[in-house]
Image (tube, rainbow, N blue to C red):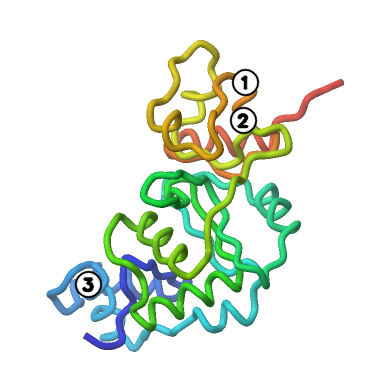
């Protein structure tokens, strides 16, 4: 079906589009049928809202053009912006928490970022049907980019501490806990650290964060003051 945004790739609503969509849902005015992406596309199209191909615009306008994270991922934007500021967006950067499983990929849970050049390469590969099939979203992305010569790299800090976290940070941070089997096997580089030295002073993302914990993190990071 033409003129629909796929849910797998994600889509963004403006405030006005969200208002229209809610109003149509409340009134029961959406055409029926199709999966999530098809249903939303048909519903909004019935009210005159049509999708726009933003990838070309993003490639032209932004240095680090695409960031993906789950809805339970908390991002410290200031730290991520600083981390990316040291990189050239014209080079093919693919930034996140790397695992060596399945040929090497950045896990979707901790989030990953494409430079402008990487997004251009990825779009071209998708348009040409040049991506190897198989795997979940993050594994598929890793395989696709690897086939085009773009590989993930370590994002640990200068002391070897992690900056992107897929699993609950407490499982690495608290001393005396047994090593995480997956991290022990697939982290890059090995070995990964357990205990207080696992984690950078400038973390970028935390995964598996509940809504309540997001409020707590916001308070602890941006509001708490320490008197000296």
Residue furthest top in the image: 176
Residue 27, which numbered label?
Answer: 3
Instruction: Give the class, few, some or many, for how many residues have Cα within 10 Å of label 1's Cα (few <14, many ≥20).
Output: few
Name the one closer to the observer, 131 or 51. 131
Q: Position of residue 144 (x, y in %)?
A: 40, 66
Q: Position of residue 43 (x, y in %)?
A: 25, 78
Q: CA distance from mark 2 to mark 3?
A: 49 Å
Residue 196, which numbered label?
Answer: 1
Instruction: Give the class, few, some or many, for how many residues have Cα within 10 Å of label 2's Cα (few <14, many ≥20).
Output: many
Pointer 2 with pointer 1, Cβ within 8 A: yes
- Indicate left or right for 49 with 196 as reference: left
Q: CA distance from mark 2 to mark 1?
A: 7 Å
Query: For the residues carrying marks 2 and 3, which lies nearer the camera in this image?
Result: 2
Secondary structure, mark 2, is loop
Secondary structure, mark 1, is helix
Q: Quadrant of residue 61?
A: bottom right
Quick one: quadrant of the C terminus? Answer: top right
Q: Which residue is mark 2?
A: 199
- Indicate left or right for 62 with 24 as reference: right
Q: Quadrant of residue 94?
A: bottom right
Residue in the image at 39% along x and 61% along y: 143
Secondary structure, mark 3, is helix
């Amino acid at each position: 079906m033409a003129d629909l945004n796929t849910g797998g790739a994600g889509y963004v609503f403006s405030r006005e589009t969200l208002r229209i969509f809610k109003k149509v849902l409340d009134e029961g005015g959406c055409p029926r049928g199709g999966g999530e992406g098809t249903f939303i596309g048909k519903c909004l199209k019935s009210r005159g809202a049509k999708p726009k191909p933003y990838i070309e615009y993003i490639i032209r306008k932004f240095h680090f053009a695409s960031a993906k994270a789950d809805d339970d991922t908390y991002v410290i934007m200031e730290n991520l912006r600083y981390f990316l500021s040291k990189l050239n967006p014209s080079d093919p950067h693919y930034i996140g928490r790397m695992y060596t499983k399945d040929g090497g990929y950045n896990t979707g849970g901790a989030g990953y970022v494409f430079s402008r050049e990487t997004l251009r390469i990825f779009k071209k590969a998708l348009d040409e049907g040049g991506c190897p099939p198989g795997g979940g979203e993050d594994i598929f992305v890793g395989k696709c980019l690897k086939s085009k010569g773009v590989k993930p790299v370590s994002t640990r800090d200068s002391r070897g501490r992690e900056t992107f976290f897929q699993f609950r940070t407490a499982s690495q941070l608290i001393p005396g806990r047994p090593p995480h089997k997956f991290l022990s096997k697939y982290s890059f580089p090995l070995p990964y650290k357990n205990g207080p030295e696992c984690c950078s002073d400038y973390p970028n993302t935390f995964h598996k964060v509940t809504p309540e914990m997001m409020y707590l993190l916001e308070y602890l990071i941006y509001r708490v003051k320490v008197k000296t």
